[in-house]
Amino acid sequence: MFELISRNYQMRQNNLYQNGLVIWLTGLSGAGKSTIAIGLEKKLNEKGYFTMAMDGDLIRTGVNNDLTFTEVDRSENIRRVMEISKMLVQKDVVVICSFITPLQRQRDANRDALGHKYFEVFVDCPFDVCEARDVKGLYKKARNNEIKHFTGINAGFELPDRPHLILNSSKQSAEQCIMILYDMILPLIAEISPGK
């Protein structure tokens, strides 16, 4: 039985030719996390890497549609995403997560659970720039009390204390951010794929 499991694992590795990694983008709403995640996934897919991208909108309309935006529910939202990511990365999938993840203890829990398979990216952008962008109209709704517990207005954001990478999306273009991130993670996912 063990030989069969071992052979199946080897076949899977031979099919994917990549190392699994969870790339976790954290930052305020409007910082550019999703734009960077989408661009990175596109670039990786073009190079033949198998990826799975998840963001707050996608997860909250499905798996986590029972959760609110209280601190307890937001932590549960992150915990569930981390558990899904953990399963995927064990199958050598490159997982790209785009979540505000406002508390350091949430990010620490991710790091503890995923170990060296966790790569944290802080998409740093000043609050006023994020609010000026307001691409989803969320800041306006929060200002009008239509959204409770909104990060930056009536809920806090703790700056990450040890991200692997900081991208300044107010000074660097989305394309620059994507390329910087791509160049940093490529050696981590390509260790067993010298042909890529």
Image: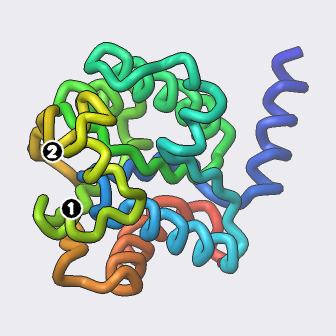
Cα distance between the residues tagged 1 and 2: 9 Å
| Residue occupied by mark 1 | 131
**What is the three-letter code of the residue carrying label 2?**
Gly
- Residue 44 falls left or right of residue 149: right
Residue 49: x percent and y percent? 67, 66
Q: Secondary structure at mark 1?
A: helix
Label 2: few (<14), some (14–19) or many (≥20) C-alpha neighbours in 10 Å: some
Q: Which residue corresponds to the image point at 64% horizontal and 51% vertical from the top-left?
A: 52
Q: Secondary structure at mark 2?
A: loop
CB contact under 8 Å: marks 1 and 2: yes
| Residue nearer the viewer, 32 or 179 | 32
What type is the residue that disc 1 sits on?
Glu
Looking at the picture, tell me which residue is in the foreground, 96 or 67.
67
Image mark for residue 152: 2
Which quadrant is home to the C terminus? Answer: bottom right
**169 or 185: nearer the viewer:** 169
Q: Earlier in the sequence, mark 1 or mark 2?
A: 1
Q: Indicate the position of residue 83 as horizontal and vertical percent values.
A: 52, 25
Q: Quadrant of residue 149?
A: top left
Q: Is residue 166 visible?
A: no
Tell me the residue at 68%/71% (across/down). Answer: 45
Residue at figure coordinates x 41%, y 76% from the top left: 178
Give left or right: position of 172 versus 136.
left
Please tell me the numbered disc located at residue 183: none
Q: Position of residue 110 (x, y in %)?
A: 35, 31
